[in-house]
Image (cartoon, rainbow, N blue to C red):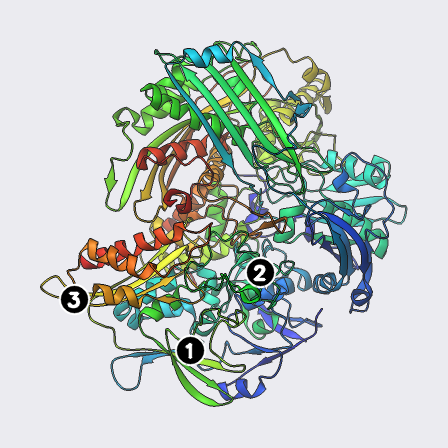
Amino acid sequence: MNRVEARDKVTGRARYAYEYPAHGVAYAYPVQAPVASGVVRSVDASAALAMPGVLAVLSCTDPPEIGSGDDPELAILQTTQVVYRGQLVAAVVASTLENARAAGRAVRVDCVARQHDVRLRADHPGLYTPEKVNPNFPAVTEYGDIAAGLAAAAARVDTTYTTPVEHNNPIEPHAALAVWDPGGGLTVFDSTQGPSADRDTIAKVLGLAPDRVRVVSPHVGGGFGSKGTTRPHAILAAIAARAAGRPVKVALTRQQMFELTGYRTPTIQRLQLGADARGRLTAVVHDVVEQTAIRTEFAEQAAVCTRAMYASPAMRTTHRLARLNVPPPSWMRAPGECPGMYALESAMDELAEAAGIDPVEFRIMNEPRTEPDSGLPFSSRNLVGCLREGARRFGWADRDPRPGIRREGRWLAGTGVAASTYPARRRPSRATAEASGDGFIVRIAAADIGTGARTALTRIAAETLGAPAARVRVEMGDSALPQASLAGGSMGTASWGSAVVKACEALLKNGSSGSADTAEDVRADAAFARHAFGAQFAEVLVDSATGEVRVPRLLGVFAAGRIVDETLARSQFIGGMTMGLGMALMERTGVDEWEGAFTGKDLAQYHVATCADIQDVDAVWIEEDDPHLNPVGAKGIGEIGITGTAAAIGNAVYHATGRRVRDLPITPARLLR
Amino acid sequence: MRPFAYFRAEDPADAVARFGPGAMYLGGGTNLVDLMRLGVARPGLLVDVSRLPLDRVGPAAGGGGLLIGAAVRNSDLAAHPLVRERYPMLARAVLSGASGQIRNMATVGGNLLQRTRCAYFQDVSMPCNKRAPGSGCPAIAGDHENLAIIGHSAGAGGSACVATHPSDMAVALTALDARVHVTGAAGDRVIPMPGLHRLPGAEPDRDTVLEAGDLITAVELPPPPPGRSLYRKVRERASFAFALVSAAALLDVAGDGTTRGCKLALGGVAHAPWRAYTAERAVAGLPATASAFSAAADAELAQARPLPGNAHKVALARGLITAVLEELSR
Amino acid sequence: MRVTLTVNGSQRTADDVWEGESLLFVLRERLALPGSKNACEQGECGSCTVLLDDVPVCACLVAAGQAAHRRVVTVEGLAPRGELGPVQQAFLEAGAVQCGFCTPGLIVQVHDLLRRTAGAGLPPPGDADIREALAGNLCRCTGYEKILDAVRLAASRLPVMP
């Protein structure tokens, strides 16, 4: 079936948060701190207030009234202490966007700057081990005798990989329209991945009961994690609307998004691996250094993937953080697995070569029987199948392992492989189903951020009800609908699908309506290690004179449970792989240590892959019938595609050139250095 | 809003007459409208010259060359039969810049006068000697991986600048010995390329030698020189990215395999499109071989003064020059 | 200033337009045509692509004054009576739409590409031509494969276009 809302999107009729009409709407424009650490001494709004159309200026020197909340980032304008450059310190509300923007520039913020530190380094004196890493894993795990394992190894690697600051950069900027009703209720049209959680957070921050707030978000222009939690723009819209006595719209500029909507922490990852003469791992050590912010801790779980990947008699994984004067890092597609698998799978390639073993076979040799760290059985695991199927389709058998020996004109050619993984989880959700006329209406406060959730849930409901999909309408993207978990962690289809199946089954029993809450089911899920796996194969060409890298071929083979919709799935896998290609070759936000600032904050400088960067990309999958997952049988497909891609490309670049670049992205600068 | 006036000029004299303090000419707008929104450009008057009757491409007076109106759109220039047939390198350079939509808007004159894409120049919360003279150049101690390696003023304190000129078209025009026709308060004149764009020196805020109110009306190309030509642009993304380094080259190899003539210009390395005269002289009369070309590249790049974070661009320029000339010699 | 222009075939007027305002702002905020998207405001993403006198441009970089007395076609104008145009239909069928924020700009850009090639009786564009022609339209979701499918599909069905 075609995507349910595709017609609205191809005609421009689909409405996004910023696009709802509101009578007498005003516009707010954020003013940001010009230093990375310091105190705001004064905010002079006199010039701004004298400008045409200006309705109000909000400032941290005169904090607007708010409630409470767990995220200090949302307590906007409550402190004059600046802990990162770009922190929200004031905002202008005006009759038009251009008036607000001009007046925002006229607000004079007087800051006393203090010493700042924005430089992540492996020997940072402030490094500490967090209590937990996201979402709730131990920061450190260790078993077996690492020293003995490394000492006994016939081949070993001890290498360090780094990944830079990466920004989600969904195409839709974060935007909100806030409308207060005369009774003190608030409606926020917000670009969010989770209307239910967004409503609860906004209510708490503003000191309102949750039932006084409604979040509406039927269409969201991508998020990739950055819209997974409430962001300051939504709170600003609400506070500004209260101050101006009118509905207020806020859309962050592309530049403002770089500081106010999260990003992937840079990582420094040391991998120590050993293998015996037969190619069996003898020890695995994955030590991660990352950054977090002054007021909030965000501990990306980069080494957690290693705990599930390969059999080893000894393993240690650690995470340490440095608190820096940086905007808070946050969720970005496959947080943890994405940078972690880059490092692990690059190191596995290096070890395979050191051991003289084909990298596909080397991974297969180290396939575990149970999850290495936990000892839990896998609900299903088809990494080996993915590797074998990928090798067959890609023509891997003919590969000459020697690096730097293939030339096609001015190009050096090479191929590489890496594994992918992402956990399969689900969260409690509620849903209702109702017979209506000759069809059915399913209601759930899920979000479709481009994943195809609306379409997938329509299919799932139709199959459960035994009705044609055309007779099923799914209402979502509104916190007034039954509470649902957010679109994140590749959990949408599993979480919402479980509730939709259950609600539809209840309807079938009573004939007219059904409702479901999966909280108990989720709590009762048996203990299994649940993960999707995959294998990615890349062919690269590297210009021998200029270091330009092109990727003529990329193949992903995935095993992710049941695939609900082939078109949606292929697009999600390939979309993830393409973002992985960007990560490998171009994505990077600069950090200026002296200014304490991100640099290159726009899409001209932060490069994401264009249509011209993609040549032959394909994704296929191995069907899995896994009874230990959820009623849908799905593992989730939104994130696994980005895991492993950068390693596969990096390994191919090594195979092409004989140069091992261990710092992403792999640019001409790094290949020529 | 910041009030300012907008005036659409009907002919060049009209435009020049309306120009006054705080005024700026508006061509396709692809750079200026952006810079206004960023707060980098703050004109009091926009004189719209995008619809002046300067939109023709045709034979230049006095034989053999081509006259390109300043208001010709980049896409029209690249698609023009005379350009494609006689100056394919120019067409290639234009097509390697920006995106289809941007090329549909951008004019020849505006392309020449676009500002640097240095991150610090575009961020008004940062110091920048080009945008705010005397405020400093944080790029020198900061993020300069893609900035200048040659002809910059990194050591000049209050006038330090390591910006690069972003145009591809201008690099091709520089190699082609184009001449820029200008009209202004002092009358008409012709400025040869190279020569329009300047190195930062003590005035990094000045990109070109134009005086206030000067309006580019046309670009004149001399007859195409003998030999073959090529424009190659190195970028990490396959399309829609500014050059890390680019090269526009014309090479004329005699029957005996020696280089009879060479014109070479580089983009992405300096405050202006960089004409590589040293390399051109170094290859003249020598066998057209890889070793001669790389020696010439070395001679040219002996002048380079890379910063700590962009030394790779010297290697890149060297590799690119050698590869492009080699390809032309085959 | 007052700006009068023809949008999707109808003459439209916007009053009190600031001279520095963009055509995109006029379309979205003054003429209630939010189909063209605002995603970078500097011509770097193509989400705001519209036809200006039949030529695709980034509406975010067109000063409102420059659009006066000219013809603008937005994505809304490509399905005027609710019937999908051939490019829209192909995007829908090929699954080339995900979050949808880049979609309107892509639809307009592809419409122009095909009108100049297959729609003009010329051979359909090859993959390399399509990829280069669409390089100014960033998509963060799809990886572009299904967009390519959609362009090929639309090209294969195309009658000569107006």
Q: Which residue is mark 3?
A: B285
Q: Earlier in the sequence, mark 3 or mark 1?
A: 1
Is residue A621 in view?
Answer: no
**With respect to residue B153, does A384 lie above or below?**
above
Count residues near mark 1 (Cα–Cα under 10 Å), then give few for <14, some for 14-19, many for 20+: some
**With respect to residue A615, does A355 lie above or below?**
above
Chain on which label 2 sits: B
Foreground residue among C113 and C120:
C113
Q: CA distance from mark 3 to mark 2?
A: 45 Å
Chain on which label 1 sits: B
* Percent of width and height locating residue A103: 74, 64
Asked if labels 2 and 1 share a chain, the reply is yes
Q: Who's the residue at 79% across and 58% down the image?
A: A23
Q: Which residue is mark 2?
A: B122
* Position of residue A628 in the picture relative to residue A185 (left or right): left
Q: Which residue is mark 1?
A: B55
Q: CA distance from mark 2 to mark 1?
A: 30 Å
Foreground residue among A309 and C139:
A309
* Percent of width and height locating residue C155: 38, 51
Q: Earlier in the sequence, mark 3 or mark 2?
A: 2
Q: Secondary structure at mark 3?
A: loop
Foreground residue among B141 and C157:
B141
User: Residue B280 occupies which quadrant of the picture?
Assistant: bottom left
